[in-house]
Image (tube, rainbow, N blue to C red):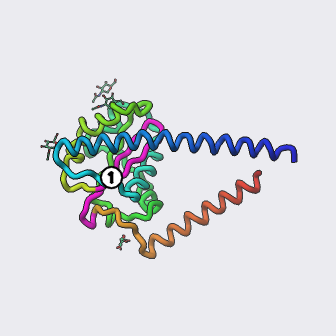
Amino acid sequence: MASIPRYFFISLLVLHSLLFSFVKCDDEEDNLLKGINSYRASLNLKTLRENDKAKCLADEMADQFKDQPCTNTTGANTVPGTEPQFSDYPKLLSKCKLNVTTTRDGMIMPACVPNLVPDLVLSNFTKSQYSNYLNDTKFSGVGIGSDDNWMVVVLTTSNPEGSFTPDNSSANLVFQLGLISHAVFLLVAFLILL
Ligand SMILES: *[C@@H]1O[C@H](CO)[C@@H](O)[C@H](O)[C@H]1NC(C)=O
Ligand SMILES: *[C@@H]1O[C@H](CO)[C@@H](O)[C@H](O)[C@H]1NC(C)=O
Ligand SMILES: *[C@@H]1O[C@H](CO)[C@@H](O)[C@H](O)[C@H]1NC(C)=O
Ligand SMILES: *[C@@H]1O[C@H](CO)[C@@H](O)[C@H](O)[C@H]1NC(C)=O
């Protein structure tokens, strides 16, 4: 019994630090979105609208990148065509209720900047090879995710192949149920451990 208050206290601490880190990330992402849209405005291009599904995928991608250190060959410095391929990319799409059919025209742009210094983050997108995509009229939507030193921008288009329309087909539903039961299992295991 005596141990309950301690667990409660630790949970509160964890919750607090989680909330705190989310708020911090959001600021950096908002700053970048504003910066990118100012850049587009300076080129007389339409403002990119926030897209929830692209945001979900950007978060998932940032989570994959987070343990990789920044080097002169990662992120915005990557030689086009040599970007890292994640074997579980289809799984990441599915987690966000997406599939390749509606995402293949989209663009995923990861950048690695120690401590996500705002000016450097923005220039890693607007003054690198990525500027060729940010100044492209075919893109209309955006989702931004970050984790540790990584910032990921996902661009969506207005045509069906890049619209990031949620996949509600039965194939995806089966996968979602699999993920949910996995999460429930973890939760139960966690409660038992407590
Ligand atoms: C990356 O850094 C390494 C070591 O600092 C250097 O040898 C290499 O030339 C750099 N590559 C590029 C593309 O700048
Ligand atoms: C991108 O960020 C790195 C830090 O990781 C910085 O050294 C570099 O100058 C930035 N590149 C651009 C084009 O701003
Ligand atoms: C976009 O940027 C690239 C490289 O900076 C440039 O070559 C191209 O002309 C630009 N396109 C538009 C529409 O501004
Ligand atoms: C992908 O999702 C779209 C939108 O819901 C759907 O029309 C399409 O059939 C799905 N494609 C595959 C291969 O499941």
Amino acid type shown at disc 1: Val
Give x and y (percent) for residue 110.
35, 43
Give x and y (percent) for residue 102.
32, 65
Q: Please give the range of residues in magenta.
A: 141-161
> Which image quarter has ligand 2?
top left
Report the front residue among 22 and 68.
Answer: 22
Residue occupied by mark 1: 142
Q: How many marks?
A: 1
Give x and y (percent) for residue 103.
32, 61
Q: Quadrant of residue 161?
A: bottom left
95 sits to left or right of 48: right
Q: Residue at x 64, y 62 (%)?
A: 184
Q: Residue at x 24, y 55 (%)?
A: 139
Q: Secondary structure at mark 1?
A: strand
Q: Residues within 10 Å of mark 1 (few under 14, many from 20)?
A: many
45 sits to left or right of 166: left
Q: Quadrant of residue 156?
A: bottom left
Q: Residue at x 30, y 44 (%)?
A: 82
